[in-house]
Every structure is written in C-alpha cells, then in structure tokens.
Image (cartoon, rainbow, N blue to C red):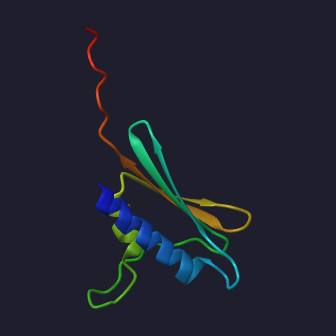
Amino acid sequence: MVQDIKLCVSELATNALLHGVPPGREFSVGIHRGEGLVRLEVRDSGPGLPVVRQPDNDACSGRGLHLVRELADGFGIDDHVVGKTVWLVFKTPTTPEPAPS
C-alpha cells in the first residue's frame, strides 16, 4: 500500500504543478491517517476541475487520474472558491484489540 500511496502522491502533485498552479502560487499535499484509512489530499489554487481521461494507447500522458482512481478505495474532488482539492482514500487493515486477560 505504501508504494501505491507514493505513486498517487507523485501523480497528483505532478498534475497540480502542470495544470493547477498558476505561476507564483503553490500547492499543498496532506496525508492523514484515521481509523481504518489513509486520506491523501492535494490542493491547488488554479481554476477548473480535473477530468479523468482515456488516452490513446500510444499517448505519453493522460493516465494519472485514471491510475490513482483505480488504486484508491475512494476518489473525489472538492471545488473551492479558489482552487480545488483532489483526494483519495485507502482502506487500511485494522488490528483487532487484544482479548482481555
């Protein structure tokens, strides 16, 4: 799962830099672990919303959102007054509580 999360961070951060961050602005990456899940968020300040595409077989780009959507257990986009947040959720195995002795 760690490798999947690293790949998704790379894909979403790359998309933010290429398509979502106007010159002179920044983007942010957040990773949060909760009970039974890991949530990854990438927020940028650019206009528009990302679109999941189906590129041609010989295309050199355009697969990032499709890939992260397939790897994650949940995917969404939150639109803000300025910018947007693309988020993913990965379910994690829960460790059962030890039985009382």
Q: Which residue is at a point 35% across and 83% down the rendered structure image? A: 55
State the quadrant of the N terminus.
Answer: bottom left
Quadrant, the C terminus: top left
Q: Is residue 80 above or below residue 22?
A: above
Question: Residue, x 69% and y 61% (percent of image)?
Answer: 80
Residue 68, visible in the rendered structure: no
Q: Position of residue 3 (x, y in %)?
A: 30, 62
- Please state if 101 lies on the left or on the right of 34 as rendered: left
- Say which of 75 and 10 sits in front: 10
> Outermost residue toward the right?
81
The percent position of residue 48, horizontal first and vertical second, equals 63, 74
Q: Is residue 13 left or right of residue 4?
A: right
> Which of the two residues, 72 or 13, is positioned nearer the viewer here?
13
Residue at point 39%, 74% (across, down): 64
> Picture quarter containing residue 78?
bottom right
Q: In which quarter of the view is residue 62 placed? A: bottom left
Q: Quadrant of residue 53?
A: bottom left
Q: How many marks?
A: 0
Query: Does residue 76 lie above or below 54 as drawn?
Result: above
Name the residue nearer the viewer: 24 or 84: 24
Picture layout, residue 16 above or below residue 92: below
Residue farthest toward the top in the current orientation of the protein = 101
Residue 4: image location, x then y, percent: 31, 61
Q: Is residue 53 visible?
A: yes
Q: Residue at 36% x, 51% y: name it.
A: 73
Is residue 58 positioned above or below 92 on the image?
A: below
Percent position (x, y) of residue 17?
55, 79
Q: Is residue 4 left or right of residue 85?
A: left
